[in-house]
Image (cartoon, rainbow, N blue to C red):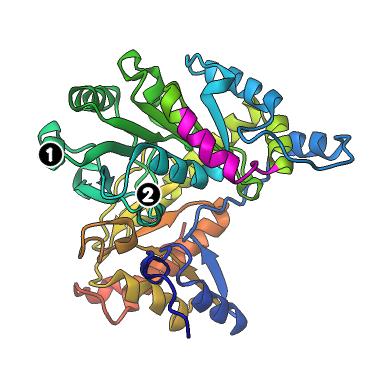
Amino acid sequence: MPTVSHRSETVPLSPFRKLIPVADAAKAAGRHVYHLNIGQPDILTHPAAVEQFRKLDWEILDYSPSNGIPSYRAKLTDYYARFGIELEADNIMVTTGGSEAILFFMLSCLDPGDEIIVPEPFYANYNGYAHIADVRVVPITGRIEDGFSLPSPEAFAAKITRRTRAIMITSPNNPTGACYSAAEMQTLADIVVKNDLFLCADEVYREFAYDHPVQSVLEFDQLHEHAIVIDSVSKRYSATGARVGALVCRNSKILAGVDRFAKLRLSPPGLGQMLSECMLEGDTAYLNGVKEEYQARRDVVFERLQAMPDVFSYRPGGAFYCFARFPISDSEDFCRWLLEDFEYEGATVMLAPGPGFYATPGLGRDECRIAYVLNRDDLNKAMDCLERALLVYPGRTTSLAADQIVMPSVK
């Protein structure tokens, strides 16, 4: 039998999807599963845009240009102008979701064996795409105790080597919900310029910053040749299936390299681009409503976690994720146990185990990511399940007083 590639056998598994077969088995057994493991919102895709999309007149679904439909890219320049970011349409490369933009960035800016510094925990697929591109992720660890704020300049300096080519961040952050302050962003800009690195910022949750606006790396004049932005319509408009993202930068050499890769895959999704162009029109009220809803969901999760014995969390500043520390020693086992052995009022909850969001071995074993993408009623029911599960989980690492082993709190 022919031998398959080492790459295919060693690529990291997705922590959001690895337990899907176990969840499917739980559903087949008659239990309802509250999915807090993946960023799939239950909010309607921009309804006015969907209605407009249905009325579009076209007869042939042809290839778009490899960098995207011109009219869509032109409208994207207007979108970025809302945030004080002046761009030309040629600064925007439309991609097959934000995922392809991440891969294009790594392939265009780093060679095999080069290093990219990423604050951890981070979006787990960075590990996978770095594996494909044969580049090394160098983690710099954040602390849950301070809400995963940006590590110090000295911590970054200690990680920079002759193979370092880039720093990559996500703000608002997936999986932590952290939003980097203006001072933290300036610190990063200074580090990048001093060491002549690229700074790639995943900004797909730009609209969902609840406590203060986030600053784009494209707003820094000193980063004109250094900054790359990863963007996507998936979460902004609740259109994960559109598979339309973008790589945005002003560095002509990066764009030329990305264009070579883009031409090889011919074009990004045509129907998704048509829908995305519709979604850019009259989207202010929609986006404001979505932001308010996620902020309310954030508060539900934070308040419920705060009431659970021996659970440590914080109030996320953005996105729709929360990272929490639980009284457990193995979050992989806990998440599997929830699906295989636990049931409360005919239901259970699915979380994403913490280790998959780290590159440092051994970290995240007592942590899980919660995606608060369900409506508030379902979110409270999911928290009921989680609260009860933590009281009866056989692998719990802290003891409970008798009066703590009660039914979940009434809301």
In-front residue for pair 43/278: 278
> Compared to 73, does 145 lie above or below?
below
The furthest residue to the front: 2
- CA–CA distance between discs 2 and 1? 29 Å
Quadrant hosting residue 152: top left
What is the three-letter code of the residue carrying label 1?
Answer: Ala
Residue name at image x 26 percent, y 24 percent: 189
Q: In front of the other: label 2 or label 1?
A: 1
Residue name at image x 41 percent, y 70 percent: 5
Query: Please, what is the dominant secondary structure of the magenta stretch?
Result: helix
Magenta stretch: includes residue 396: no
Q: Mark 2 Cα within 10 Å, few/some/many (few <14, many 20+)?
A: some
Spot occupied by residue 175 in the image (x, y as percentages of width and height): 37, 50
Q: Which of marks 1 and 2 precedes in the sequence?
A: 1
Question: SS at mark 2?
Answer: helix
Q: Quick check: can you spot residue 198?
A: yes
Q: Quick check: can you spot residue 234?
A: no
Pointer 2: what residue? 302
Spot occupied by residue 67 in the image (x, y as percentages of width and height): 60, 32
Label at residue 212:
none
Spot occupied by residue 19 in the image (x, y as percentages of width and height): 46, 72
In-front residue for pair 252/272: 252
Magenta stretch: includes residue 257: yes
> Compared to 330, does 307 lie above or below?
above
What is the three-letter code of the residue carrying label 2?
Answer: Phe
Horizontally, residue 235 falls left or right of residue 195, namely right
Span shown in magenta: 255-269
Horizontally, residue 395 falls left or right of residue 317, namely left
Q: Mark 1 Cα within 10 Å, few/some/many (few <14, many 20+)?
A: few
Quadrant hosting residue 356: bottom left
Label at residue 155:
1
